[in-house]
Image (cartoon, helix red, strand yellow):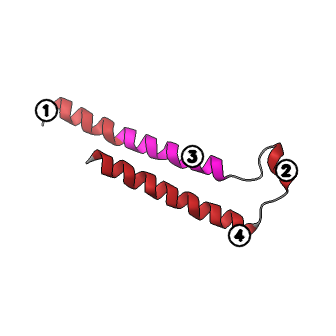
Amino acid sequence: MNAERLLNMIIRRVMQRVVFRGVDAGIDAVTKKGNGPAAQEDGPPHAQATRQQKQTARKAQRAARMASRITKL
């Protein structure tokens, strides 16, 4: 295995992890409730709605990861 292939393999793995962390952070930021003036006007979110939003976010994360894996093949 030459050095270029080895370097590309390492860079690809690192970038994949960075992208996954970015997707996770973005979804967490979108689903986070209670921050900002708009959330304070509406009052606290209902527990069931929050749980459903977290489940939807997890499904979106899984879908994004699977799509990323499929496109790399």
Quadrant housing residue 12: top left
Measured in 3D between alpha carbons, the distance from the residue under mark 3 to the one under mark 2, in whole angstroms, is: 22 Å
Quadrant housing residue 46: bottom right
| 3 and 2 marks in contact (CB < 8 Å) | no
Query: Closest to the observer: 28 or 13?
Result: 28
Measured in 3D between alpha carbons, the distance from the residue under mark 4 to the one under mark 3, in whole angstroms, is: 22 Å
Secondary structure of residue under mark 1:
loop
* Magenta stretch encompasses residue 20: yes
Q: As displayed, is residue 52 above or below residue 35?
A: below
Label whose residue precedes the other's in the sequence (3 or 2)? 3
Label whose residue precedes the other's in the sequence (4 or 3)? 3
Percent x, y of residue 14: 37, 39
Q: As displayed, is residue 69 above or below residue 48?
A: above
In this rendering, would 24 be left or right of 48?
left
Q: Which mark is residue 25?
A: 3
Identity, as a three-letter code, of the amino acid under mark 2: Gln
* Magenta stretch encompasses residue 63: no
Measured in 3D between alpha carbons, the distance from the residue under mark 3 to the one under mark 1, in whole angstroms, is: 35 Å
